[in-house]
């Protein structure tokens, strides 16, 4: 590996920050510090330009340094920096909810605000249980997640998630009564599929088996990512999501789509449910909602769910749930400005027009050393590498480092390299990402 790392700042400077999802000791010995961002690029603390191939962490969909968002945030800070949303309201929160309802999948026009994807997931799980209880089915408390799923790091999201490293330490702290569908990654059948794989719709039938085991009357909801991101980009086989929808309908089980990464244009429609023509009952979002500028999440609930909970005396709080920063005015301002940028520039559908160019570009990596599979959809791409014997993840990490040293930021999960560039990307930048990754693959043993 030829990567030449930037010199470390004095050790003591880096000790206090306990970094999330990071190999702290390794990082602090050879840090990679980002100091500035504009458009498609970051600049490191040393002033080196790095092309952003992952939209930060799948969130900066309109590119960095958007003046419109900065101005809206600055203005809101100057007008009213904070206002509570418990038994009080502020106009911008209603305005944002109305805007979101307009682009939502059919019927999902009741919006609950959170501050992150993890909070969105835990909120959706709680709403699902509350909904069934309000309809006299209080015994429906089980959740069905999926292997390789990532639904954030709250206890609820971790329990329905299916990534072993996120779960194994916390085994006895999981929500009880959760079961998991099998994941849909099958390289033997589907290697190098372009867009959705042909093989595997039948994997949705496993839901019938879990229902036969637990009984439908105990199950509140099924939660899946339409496209799993964190586990290394796992696509739904053609027909799979429709079948999940049919089975849920048959058994009165709610279907939750976690669209934290697929939401806001990543797959060529505002939401993946629209791209795949399958409408869930609840949809969790975050990330692209504010272009990553201010933390915010939103749960989109079907109106039937909201209406079912609007019962009892009118002075009663219908759902005992919320966050101090739910509908934070500055986050609302950032989200409104973000939606404005997305709309004006056609970014919620731009990935569809770039999809075939992107697909050809990432599939050109087929045949390079160690490449076992290439997967793509919308502006998402992944290259899966053969792990080194006894050292899983080390090859992926070295390829990630090599790309970074060559001026392109990609994301590594184990031995999978994932890409999800800002939706403003141009052809020459697509080419640069793929050329750089290709060179890194050739360079890495
Ligand atoms: N659901 C999904 C589908 C996600 O992808 C979350 C929930 C949690 O969101 P918060 O905002 O609580 O982090 C996520 C987060 C990666 C990567 O490299 C993906 C995420 C976070 C960090 C890294 O794939 N997704």
Image (cartoon, rainbow, N blue to C red):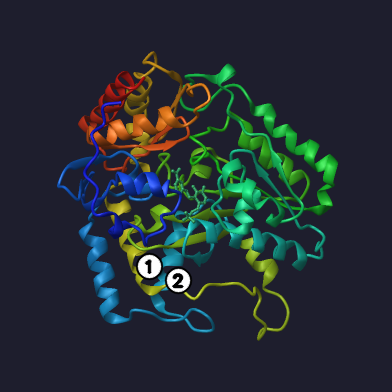
From the Cβ of disc 2, is ligand 1 less than 8 Å away? no
Position of 437 with respect to 112 (left or right) is left
Q: Residue 338, how many percent across, how many down?
A: 32, 58
| Quadrant of the drawing holding the C terminus | top left
Q: Which residue is mark 2?
A: 327
User: Would residue 243 be found to the left or right of residue 113 on screen?
Assistant: right
Q: CA distance from mark 1 to mark 2?
A: 7 Å
Which quadrant of the structure image shows residue 422?
Answer: top left
Could you classify mark 1 by the number of other residues whose Cα lies within 10 Å: few (under 14), some (14-19), or many (20 or more)? many
Left or right position of 322 against 204: left
Where disc 2 sits, the SS reads: loop
Q: Residues within 10 Å of mark 2 (few under 14, many from 20)?
A: many
Residue found 45% across the figure and 58% down from its top: 102
Identify the residue at image location x=56%, y=43%.
225
* Image location of residue 204, percent across then percent down: 69, 34
- Where's residue 332, x and y in %? 38, 68
In the rendered structure, find residue 187 and report the number of the disc placed on it: none
Q: Which residue is situated farthest in the top direction here?
A: 367
| Residue 426, quarter of picture | top left
Give the SS element for disc 1: helix
Residue 355 vs residue 41, the one in the foreground: 41
**Residue 180's image quarter?**
top right
Q: Is residue 218 left or right of residue 222?
A: right
Q: Is residue 264 above or below residue 228?
A: below
Mark 1 vs 2: CB contact within 8 A: yes
For ligand 1, tell me if the residue under mark 1 lies within 8 Å.
Answer: no
Say if residue 279 shows up in the picture: yes
Residue 359 percent coordinates (x, y)? 37, 25
**What label does residue 331 carry, if any?**
1
* Rendered view: 32 above or below 418: below
> Residue pushed farthest left?
47
Quadrant containing the N terminus is top left
């Amino acid at each position: 590996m030829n990567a030449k790392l930037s010199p470390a700042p004095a050790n003591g400077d880096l000790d206090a920050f306990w970094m999330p999802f990071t190999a702290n000791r390794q990082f602090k010995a050879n840090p990679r510090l980002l100091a500035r961002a504009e458009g498609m690029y970051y600049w490191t603390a040393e002033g080196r330009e790095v092309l952003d191939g992952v939209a930060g962490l799948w969130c900066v969909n309109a590119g960095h340094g958007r003046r419109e968002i900065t101005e809206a945030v600055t203005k809101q800070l100057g007008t009213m920096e904070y206002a509570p949303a418990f038994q009080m309201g502020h106009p911008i929160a209603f305005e944002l909810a109305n805007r979101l309802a307009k682009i939502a999948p059919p019927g999902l026009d009741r919006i609950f605000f959170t501050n992150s994807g993890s909070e969105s997931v835990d909120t959706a799980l709680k709403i699902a249980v509350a909904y069934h209880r309000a309809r006299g089915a209080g015994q429906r408390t089980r959740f069905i997640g999926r292997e390789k799923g990532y639904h954030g790091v709250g206890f609820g999201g971790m329990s329905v998630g299916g990534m072993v490293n996120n779960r194994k330490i916390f085994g006895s702290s999981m929500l009880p009564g959760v079961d998991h569908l099998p994941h849909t990654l099958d390289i033997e059948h589907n290697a190098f599929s372009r867009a959705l794989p042909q093989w595997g719709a039948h994997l949705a039938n496993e839901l019938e088996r879990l229902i036969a085991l637990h009984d439908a009357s105990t199950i509140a909801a099924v939660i899946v990512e339409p496209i799993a991101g964190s586990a290394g980009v796992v696509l739904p086989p053609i027909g799979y999501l429709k079948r999940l929808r049919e089975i849920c309908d048959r058994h009165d089980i709610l279907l939750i789509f976690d669209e934290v990464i697929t939401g806001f244009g990543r797959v060529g429609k505002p939401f993946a449910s629209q791209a795949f023509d399958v409408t869930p009952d609840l949809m969790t979002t975050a990330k692209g909602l504010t272009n990553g500028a201010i933390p915010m999440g939103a749960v989109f609930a079907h109106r039937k769910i909201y209406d079912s909970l609007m019962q009892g005396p009118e002075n009663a709080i219908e759902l005992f749930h919320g966050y101090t920063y739910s509908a934070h005015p500055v986050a609302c301002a950032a989200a409104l400005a973000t939606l404005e940028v997305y709309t004006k520039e056609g970014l919620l559908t731009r990935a569809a027009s770039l999809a075939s160019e992107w697909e050809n570009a990432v599939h050109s990596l087929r045949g390079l050393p160690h490449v076992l599979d290439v997967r793509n959809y919308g502006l998402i791409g992944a290259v899966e590498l053969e792990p080194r014997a006894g050292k899983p993840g080390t090859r992926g990490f070295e390829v990630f480092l090599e790309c970074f040293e060559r001026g392109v930021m990609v994301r590594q999960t184990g031995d999978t390299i994932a890409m999800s560039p800002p939706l403003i990307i141009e052809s020459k930048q697509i080419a640069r990402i793929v050329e750089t990754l290709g060179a890194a693959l050739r360079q890495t043993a």
